[in-house]
Amino acid sequence: DLVLTQSPDSLAVSLGERATINCKSSQSVLYASNNNNYLAWYQQKPGQPPKLLIYRAFTRASGVPDRFSGSGSGTDFTLTISSLQAEDVAVYYCQQYALTPPRTTFGQGTRLEIK
Amino acid sequence: QVQLLESGPGLVKPSETLSLTCAVSGYSISSGYNWGWIRQPPGKGLEWIGTFVHRGSTNYNPSLKSRVTISVDMSENQFSLRLTSVSAADTAVYYCARVVYGDWSFDAWGQGALVTVSS
């Protein structure tokens, strides 16, 4: 089965400090045909829909501040917030895509708070 | 700028059919892109339901496939979700969303519609 596991489940970081969230897939999301990793990151604040931050592992979506960055390949990925701002308090999800059959799954979420 | 708006009954009885519509504005869905449905039970994580591919096919979550239909009405610029034989486990906020071109991530979302399954 296609499983994405995020770590940690929750995280508390001081303002201005770095926050790091990990995402591990049960199978590789790197497609050799185009060398793309189909892994995305979202931010969700209470009462709001998720907001796309990163897609294809490291491409920032339009309008996303550059303090958000994505890295990794294959099965292991990381979302980094370089300098935590108060407005970054949210739940973060990763998402992967599998080709056969075509389907997508989300990680369980990581809650980020201010220390 | 594309906008999506979900609509439909907020309360559905067990064993009945859940039906939701997503109206798209600011973009013609006949022009391209893929479109999807995602749900989120209260206080829980996100679950992909299915995606309509612009070429005319659909992909569904294997765990829901036997109960789900996604259809598109190009003339009304909207797409719809039908989920049959619902139970309390189907209570969730249902989101419609646009898929990033050439990808499977979702870059534009509706605000979500809470559907409660209860008698």
Image: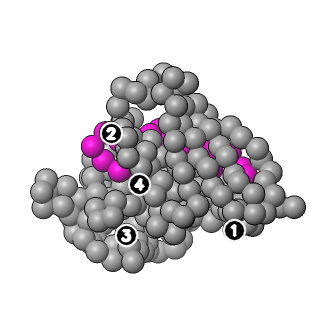
| Residue B89 tag number | 1
Measured along the vertical axis of the image, is residue A102 above or below residue B11? below
Read off the magenta span.
Answer: B94-115
Q: Is residue B60 left or right of residue B64?
A: left
Q: Secondary structure at mark 3?
A: strand
Q: Give the amino acid type for the residue marked by disc 4 in the picture.
A: Asn
- Quadrant the C terminus of chain A occupies: bottom right
Mark in the foreground, 1 or 4: 4
| Amino acid type of the residue tagged 1 in the rendering | Ala
* Separation of residues labelled 3 and 4 (CA atoms): 24 Å
- Whole-percent x, y for residue A110 in the image: 51, 66
**B6 vs A55: above or below:** above
B66, A88: nearer the viewer: B66
Residue at position x 51%, y 23% in the image? B75
Numbered disc 4: what chain? Answer: B
- Which residue is label 2 attached to? B55
Query: Does B95 lie within the magenta span?
Result: yes
Q: Could you tell me how far apart the alpha carbons at marks 2 and 4 are, in whole angstroms?
A: 12 Å
At 23% from the left and 59% from the top, the residue drawn is: A37
Residue that numbered label 4 is attached to: B59
Label 2 chain ID: B
Q: Secondary structure at mark 2?
A: loop
Pointer 3: what residue?
A23
